[in-house]
Amino acid sequence: MSDHAFSAEEREALYKAIFSRRDVRGQFAPAPVPEEVLTRVLTAAHHAPSVGFMQPWNFIVVRDPAVKARVHADFAQANEEAKALFEGERQTLYSRLKLEGIREAPVNLCITCDRERSGPVVLGRTHIPTMDLYSCVCAVQNLWLAARAEGLGVGWVSILHEDRLREALGIPERIVPIAYLCLGYVSYFHETPELEQAGWRNRLPLEDLVFRDRWGDRG
Ligand SMILES: Cc1cc2c(cc1C)N(C[C@H](O)[C@H](O)[C@H](O)COP(=O)(O)O)c1[nH]c(=O)[nH]c(=O)c1N2
């Protein structure tokens, strides 16, 4: 075993956060999120890896019910549009799903990407320009896991019109909204993804997803 490995207990805690993290939509408690807890999960996000150490993220912390209501109104419209894209039984099932907790969650958080944060030429982004966007997604995941360890639920809401989200939050044109998250204490965490429980989709077997050396080659 490597000298740098975590102890068994530490590993267990990390995997516990990974496997018991859930996308939370429906069971937010109204209890406020203390400022120091919010700072801890934001600090976890800020310690995510980023291309060229660009740290292209910002965090818009939304607590104002009026702002939440505006975002929720857009969700309601986008969700109707989304529903129309599915047919028959799938549409019926879709309309039963709860896909956001915008108004119930005490904190909403928008993680954004400033694509110009460290000038036009960024180490590591020279050939694949989307790397800064992916860096921000790493920040989202760090926050999601840290929140789970804090007993906080997080739900990602992406059924939104980007232009209206920008307007609601005053996001300038050069900044890209990456994730709109709902955050708060929860009464419980589901054991498995809600979409799985609802019969929408199951977790795929890992062995079907792993190739050896070349695409399609299972070795
Ligand atoms: C980029 C992105 C965007 C969204 C999501 C996730 C991610 C990564 N998810 C959550 C998603 O449905 C959920 O992660 C999966 O169903 C797996 O469940 P657990 O996260 O393991 O609980 C999500 N959930 C939801 O209810 N409304 C949404 O708009 C979205 N959007």
Image (cartoon, grey):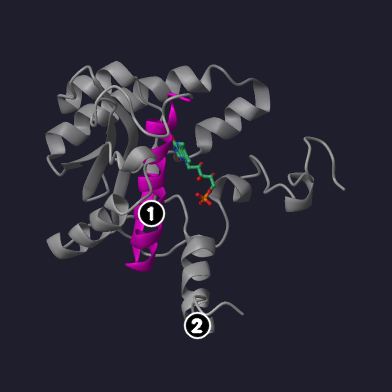
Q: Amino acid at mark 1?
A: Asn
Q: Element type at marker 1?
A: helix
Give yes or no for residue 56 being in the magenta stretch: no
- Identified at 36% across, 43% down, the residue is 50
| Dot 2 alpha-carbon crowd within 10 angstroms: few under 14, some 14 to 19, many 20 or more | few
Q: Amino acid at mark 2?
A: Ser
Nearest the camera: 52 or 182?
Answer: 52
**In the rendered image of this protein, does residue 89 appear above or below residue 4?**
above
Which percent across, then down, holds residue 31?
A: 20, 61
Q: CA distance from mark 2 to mark 1?
A: 21 Å
Whether residue 27 is visible: no
**In the rendered image of this protein, does residue 18 appear above or below residue 136?**
below
Segment tinted magenta in the rendering? 128-155
**In the rendered image of this protein, does residue 136 appear above or below residue 9?**
above
Residue under label 2: 7
Which percent across, then down, holds residue 40?
A: 23, 62
